[in-house]
Image (cartoon, rainbow, N blue to C red):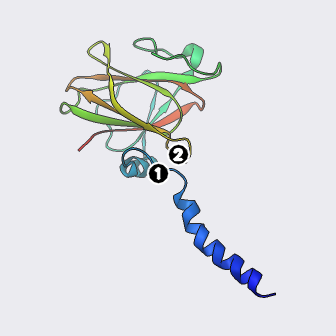
Amino acid sequence: MFRSPLIALVLLALLGPASAADDGCEKFAWSLARDRAAFAATGKTVIAAGETLAALPAGALVIRLQQGAQASFEMPPERKPRTEQWHGGMVRLPALAKSGIYQITLSDDAWIDVIQNGRYARSVGSTGRSDCPGVRKSVRLDLDASPVVLQVSGVSPDAITIAIGVVE
């Protein structure tokens, strides 16, 4: 009679921590701990789509997006949005401090285009999961020390949080 509740408590104690770790956040192809911390921090830089940043933010960046039909882009997005109701836009970033592999992590499902020197930058790697709360995907690109246009499209919410940094 007393064994059933005791067994249930033991099982809950054993399974509780495992379910918290099984949310997918540790299963990306590379660690996103730095990006997740930046997403959780207060005082993030907030910018409206279409604006230009004077400097690359040290932490995460929140971009307030435009409705799909009104969104403006430097170049057409390389992929069409999957839904009719979506948000998007672009921001201009200053010249990067140095050439190298940069990682751009997104909070929500979106298509991302990075434009540098009038061309689409090509990804050298990407990782994504739908089971990590607050983080959807991360892309790595080989960029040079020149200005960047960052475009996002196909975003469901009207804002997206992004972390950008050199891979070290």
Q: Quadrant of residue 69?
A: top right
State the residue at coordinates (19%, 30%): 99
Cβ atoms under marks 2 and 1 closer than 8 Å: yes
Look at the image and tell me whether residue 138 can be seen: no
Quarter placement of the C terminus: top left
Q: Residues within 10 Å of mark 2 (few under 14, many from 20)?
A: some
Considering every residue shown, the one lying at the far right of the view is 1
Kind of element beneath mark 2 = loop
Q: Nearer the viewer, mark 2 or mark 1?
A: 2
State the residue at coordinates (53%, 47%): 132
Query: Against 34, is 125 above or below?
Result: above
Residue denoted by label 1: 40
Quarter placement of the N terminus: bottom right
Q: Is residue 156 left or right of residue 47?
A: right
State the residue at coordinates (77%, 88%): 2
Residue denoted by label 2: 134
Residue 41 locus on image (x, y percent): 43, 51
Residue 3 locus on image (x, y percent): 74, 85
Q: Quadrant of residue 50?
A: top left
Look at the image and tell me whether residue 124 can be seen: yes
Q: Residues within 10 Å of mark 1 (few under 14, many from 20)?
A: few
Amino acid at the residue labelled 1: Ala
Query: Against 89, is 38 above or below?
Result: below
Q: Which residue is more in the foreground, 136 or 19?
A: 19
